[in-house]
Image (cartoon, rainbow, N blue to C red):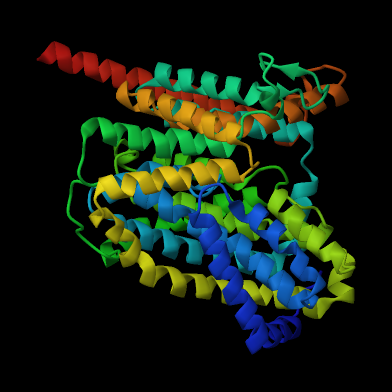
């Protein structure tokens, strides 16, 4: 793939035709709605619309499906901030601080920063897609099972920092998450485990049901116990972020963009993993890490930037080599194939107008999403004014629909309710929710990569330390754990010193 200004200009010329603008706008709108509604997801949205490939020409159809994908990445933050229901798995880190900001009357600035971060990260990432796709795509090819195992272990080591001062409680949540992820069938041998004779558990515990239970149902149970009249006790302070808010978060946006873009290149490294890494990065760069989890704008800006940068970055291995980095892009690959198109180097030479029109449409789509989302900030923030006796049942209904819609099994609703009780107890006794979510996300990919790596290496664990990339990630994992334990030790020492002084 060779960049050409003429090709890019041709792409913009085609993308800006009224027909393609219309389908891009429809895709952005549908994607935002898909992101807002818990449990639907961009994969399901594209799957539902795949039959349109029999009616629409390839260019508008693929433009619309791409817009659904990155539109969903925008929309997932909305309910995460407003009512603590992550619309997407990647929006879980956003909920940690976004919802706290909403409870402080700052839902408007949090939503505005999320939209601006998404726009900035998406645009910068598209520059990378435009100019450096072939070089960056080769990075993805350098990753094998050993590298993915080390990467997942590094990500899992974030549990130490995400646990804050409650390390034992955080590790307890991690173990619970790992056990939940082990339920079902062994991915390599196909044998059942931890199913206890329940047929529905053979398919495993659905991650969306876990997230909905921990966050949505758990929050509802806590509010019912408190008998609150409104979901927030404070008045709305601001509708949009101030200049100070933007100055405070611009570096977080850039860091999140870098983390998300490069992790988005890696097949199997989903947006949920990327946003947790970005969240942890912001905690480490912050001068006030104690604010995270209690309403830090950087905790919204970093993950949201990483979320959208990763979504754009994932198009590089898809378009350059025909390798879909995740399930949503796999559905999009299916759309290409249904039109008789095979993504890869030849696509750029045989169908340059199509490829560059898709890339140009992403620039246009990012602007559309910013225009769509910023004016709606006030509308979403006004949810704080809805009395909880009305809003609470609505949250429950949407949560039930979200849990059921993934696999159309009522069993997933019961799983969500069970984890709702767990989420309620975790909040009540001061257990952090992030470790359990992170471990549920990472466990399946970690298990598959670990078994594949050991099979290739004839059972030798030295493979993780003899391959350069995996060695770097293993050292980073050990470094993060040691640093986290040292911070824990220092905080405990300072607490004891303060108690002795008193």
Determine whether, in the image, residue 179 is placed left or right of residue 369.
Answer: right
Q: Identify the residue at horizontal 69%, vertical 72% (top origin).
A: 63
Q: Can you tell which quarter of the image residue 27 is in?
A: bottom right
Determine whether, in the image, residue 357 is placed left or right of residue 38.
Answer: right
Residue 194, percent from left and from top: 66, 15
Q: Quadrant of the N terminus?
A: bottom right
Q: Quadrant of the C terminus?
A: top left
Q: Identify the residue at horizontal 64%, vertical 28% (top origin).
A: 474
Determine whether, in the image, residue 1 is placed left or right of residue 263.
Answer: right
Figure label count: 0
Residue 42, percent from left and from top: 62, 55
Q: Identify the residue at horizontal 52%, vertical 63% (top origin).
A: 32
Question: Is 387 or 425 nearer to us in this picture?
Answer: 387
Residue 177, percent from left and from top: 55, 25
Q: Identify the residue at horizontal 69%, vertical 53% (top origin).
A: 328
Residue 429, percent from left and from top: 32, 20
């Amino acid at each position: 793939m060779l960049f050409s200004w003429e090709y890019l200009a041709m792409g913009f010329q085609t993308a800006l035709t009224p027909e393609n603008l219309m389908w891009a706008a429809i895709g952005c709108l549908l994607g935002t709605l898909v992101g807002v509604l818990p449990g639907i997801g961009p994969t399901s949205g594209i799957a539902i619309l795949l039959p349109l490939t029999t009616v629409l020409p390839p260019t508008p159809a693929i433009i619309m499906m791409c817009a659904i994908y990155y539109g969903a990445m925008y929309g997932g933050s909305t309910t995460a901030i407003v009512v603590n229901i992550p619309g997407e798995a990647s929006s879980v880190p956003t909920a940690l601080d976004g919802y706290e900001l909403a409870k402080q009357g700052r839902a408007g600035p949090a939503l505005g920063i999320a939209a601006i971060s998404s726009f900035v990260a998406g645009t910068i990432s598209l520059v990378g897609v435009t100019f450096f796709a072939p070089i960056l795509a080769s990075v993805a090819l350098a990753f094998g099972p050993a590298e993915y195992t080390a990467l997942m272990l590094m990500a899992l080591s974030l549990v130490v920092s995400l646990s804050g001062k409650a390390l034992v409680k955080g590790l307890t949540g991690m173990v619970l998450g790992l056990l939940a992820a082990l339920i079902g069938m062994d991915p390599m041998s196909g044998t059942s485990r931890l199913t206890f004779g329940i047929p529905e558990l053979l398919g495993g515990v659905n991650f969306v049901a876990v997230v909905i239970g921990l966050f949505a149902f758990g929050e509802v149970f806590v509010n019912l116990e408190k008998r609150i009249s409104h979901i927030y006790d404070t008045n709305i302070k601001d509708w949009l972020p101030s200049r100070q808010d933007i100055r405070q978060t611009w570096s977080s946006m850039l860091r999140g963009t870098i983390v998300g873009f490069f992790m988005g290149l890696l097949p199997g490294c989903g947006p949920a993993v990327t946003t947790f890494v970005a969240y942890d990065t912001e905690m480490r760069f912050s001068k006030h890490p104690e604010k995270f989890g209690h309403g830090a704008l950087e905790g919204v800006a970093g993950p949201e930037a990483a979320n959208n940068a990763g979504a754009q970055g994932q198009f590089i291995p898809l378009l350059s080599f025909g390798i879909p980095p995740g399930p949503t892009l796999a559905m999009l690959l299916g759309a290409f194939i249904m039109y008789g198109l095979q993504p890869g180097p030849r696509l750029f030479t045989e169908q340059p107008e199509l490829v560059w029109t898709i890339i140009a449409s992403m620039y246009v789509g990012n602007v559309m999403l910013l225009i769509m989302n910023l004016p709606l900030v006030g509308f979403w923030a006004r949810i704080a004014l809805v009395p909880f006796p009305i809003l609470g049942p609505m949250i429950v209904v949407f949560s039930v629909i979200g849990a059921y819609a993934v696999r159309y099994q009522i069993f997933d609703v019961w799983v969500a309710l069970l984890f709702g009780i767990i989420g309620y107890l975790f909040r009540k006794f001061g257990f952090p929710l992030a470790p359990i979510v992170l471990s549920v996300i990472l466990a399946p990919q970690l298990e598959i990569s670990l078994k594949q790596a050991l099979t290739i290496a004839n059972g030798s664990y030295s493979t993780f330390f003899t391959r350069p990339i995996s060695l770097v990630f293993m050292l980073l994992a050990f470094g993060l754990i040691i640093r986290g334990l040292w911070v824990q030790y220092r905080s405990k020492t300072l607490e004891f010193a303060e108690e002795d002084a008193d």
